[in-house]
């Protein structure tokens, strides 16, 4: 138990933290200060709550607090975004107060808030005035990440918690706190070991408050996702554009190729039929035009030949000339149109295809498919 139980004597062996101003002075026993910071870094960087135990004195008309004990806020619950003491917590604190700190009173509370520094919210203020109603009750806010701690007390207007600029750490025999510490030890974390190492000249960047860190993390992830989707959309658009352009270009080429193949197939079929029927030399023999004396001489395969298309046209004209020998004044004529077939022409003029062979004979045709647009047919 502290020797300052009933004496209005200030400790002699003290260390000042910060600037001492105002009318309230706070003395924190070294065991208590050490245990609070061990509590702050224990079991991860979660928010925690506890109570401060000690005595209140008025010395030289000033409020003086001697904090000689700290009890964990076990079984706390989260309410409005902060940890608060539950009914079970109160029962636990009463048991520990009677067991280790008999004769002392609760003179404040401690709140561990990693990443929030010395920020005190309206929730802290409301919890303080509702649960620690003595005028001299204090709040000790600790941030283990930023390695800061601050004392706060209610102002005279009872409107807010004001910061106290400094306090004292004193050294004294404190059996109650020592026994409580032994019974409620923490597993030493890596943070504790790092605190004992000598500090280097390296500048440390203070972490941002937890809410800001979480928000920045979410925004960063959203930006990455938007960039990824944008890149994928651009790639897909480029692929679709290339494929579309290729299809359009190839479609035109395919249509042209189909027309050429159809013309070649017709020419080849016609020439094959004529060569079988009349022989190669007769097919390519010189033909005379209507009323013209000029001869069209087409050399055989040993000399330069005309194109297949010209041969087909020449042969078509020759067939028209040949058909004149069988034409009578009673015969009708019909000029072949695009898409016509011989069977269709028969149905058009005779109502059926029975006259197809007669038409072939009249026009000296051997193949009903060898009719061309623009040719005149004689219909018996």
Image: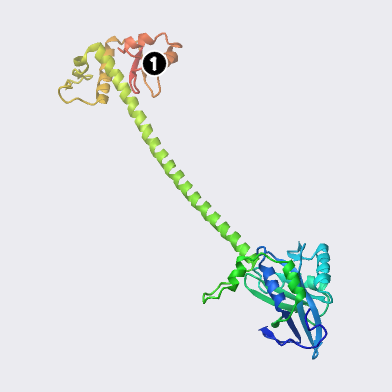
Q: Position of residue 252 (x, y in %)?
A: 38, 36
Asked if residue 191 can be seen in this view, the reply is: yes
Q: Position of residue 187 (x, y in %)?
A: 66, 64
Asked if residue 122 can be seen in this view, the reply is: no
Query: How many C-alpha atoms fall within 10 Å of the one at disc 1: few (<14), some, or many (≥20)?
Result: many
Q: Residue at x 45, y 47 (%)?
A: 238
Q: Residue at x 23, y 26 (%)?
A: 307
Mark 1 lies on a secondary structure that is helix
Q: Residue 258's quadrant in the figure?
A: top left
Of residues 176 and 50, the one nearer the viewer is 176
Q: Residue at x 55, y 73 (%)?
A: 204
- Residue 363 vs 198, above or below: the answer is above
The quarter of the rendered structure image containing the C terminus is: top left
Q: In screen coordinates, is 135 left or right of 171?
A: right
- Residue 192 vs 365, above or below: the answer is below
The quarter of the rendered structure image containing the N terminus is: bottom right
Q: In screen coordinates, is 356 left or right of 61?
A: left
Query: Which residue is the site of mark 1?
Result: 342
Of residues 331 and 18, the one nearer the viewer is 18
Of residues 112 and 307, the one nearer the viewer is 112
Q: Residue 138's quadrant in the figure?
A: bottom right
Q: Residue furthest bottom?
A: 60
Colour mode of the rendering: rainbow
Q: Position of residue 32 (x, y in %)?
A: 72, 75
Q: Position of residue 116 (x, y in %)?
A: 66, 70
Of residues 304 and 204, the one nearer the viewer is 204
Q: Residue at x 50, y 49 (%)?
A: 232
């Amino acid at each position: 138990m502290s020797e300052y139980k009933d004496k209005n004597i200030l400790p002699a062996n003290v260390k000042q933290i910060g600037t001492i101003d105002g009318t309230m002075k706070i003395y924190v026993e070294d065991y208590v200060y050490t245990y609070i910071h061990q509590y702050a870094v224990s079991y991860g960087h979660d928010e925690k709550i506890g109570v401060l135990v000690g005595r209140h004195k008025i010395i030289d008309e000033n409020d003086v607090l001697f904090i000689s004990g700290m009890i964990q806020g076990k079984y706390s619950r989260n309410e409005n975004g902060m940890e608060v003491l539950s009914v079970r917590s109160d029962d636990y604190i009463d048991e520990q107060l009677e067991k280790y700190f008999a004769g002392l009173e609760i003179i404040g509370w401690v709140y561990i808030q990693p990443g929030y520094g010395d920020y005190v919210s309206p929730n802290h203020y409301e919890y303080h005035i509702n649960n620690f109603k003595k005028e001299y009750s204090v709040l000790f806010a600790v941030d283990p990440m930023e390695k800061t701690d601050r004392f706060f007390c209610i102002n005279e207007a009872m409107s807010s918690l004001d910061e106290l600029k400094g306090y004292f750490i004193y050294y004294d025999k404190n059996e109650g706190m020592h026994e409580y510490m032994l019974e409620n030890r923490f597993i030493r974390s890596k943070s504790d070991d790092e605190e004992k190492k000598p500090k280097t000249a390296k500048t440390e960047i203070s972490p941002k408050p937890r809410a800001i860190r979480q928000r920045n993390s979410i925004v960063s992830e959203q930006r990455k996702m938007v960039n990824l989707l944008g890149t994928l959309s651009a790639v897909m658009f480029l692929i679709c554009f290339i494929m579309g352009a290729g299809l359009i270009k190839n479609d035109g080429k395919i249509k042209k190729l189909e027309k050429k193949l159809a013309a070649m197939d017709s020419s080849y079929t016609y020439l094959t039929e004529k060569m079988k029927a009349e022989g190669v030399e007769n097919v390519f023999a010189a033909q005379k035009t209507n009323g013209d004396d000029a001869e069209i001489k087409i050399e055989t395969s040993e000399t330069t030949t005309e194109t297949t298309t010209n041969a087909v046209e020449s042969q078509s004209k020759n067939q028209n000339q040949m058909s004149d020998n069988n034409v009578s004044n009673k015969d009708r004529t019909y000029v072949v149109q695009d898409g016509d077939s011989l069977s269709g022409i028969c149905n058009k003029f005779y109502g059926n295809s029975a006259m197809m062979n007669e038409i072939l004979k009249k026009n000296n045709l051997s193949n009903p498919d060898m009719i061309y647009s623009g040719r005149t047919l004689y219909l018996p």
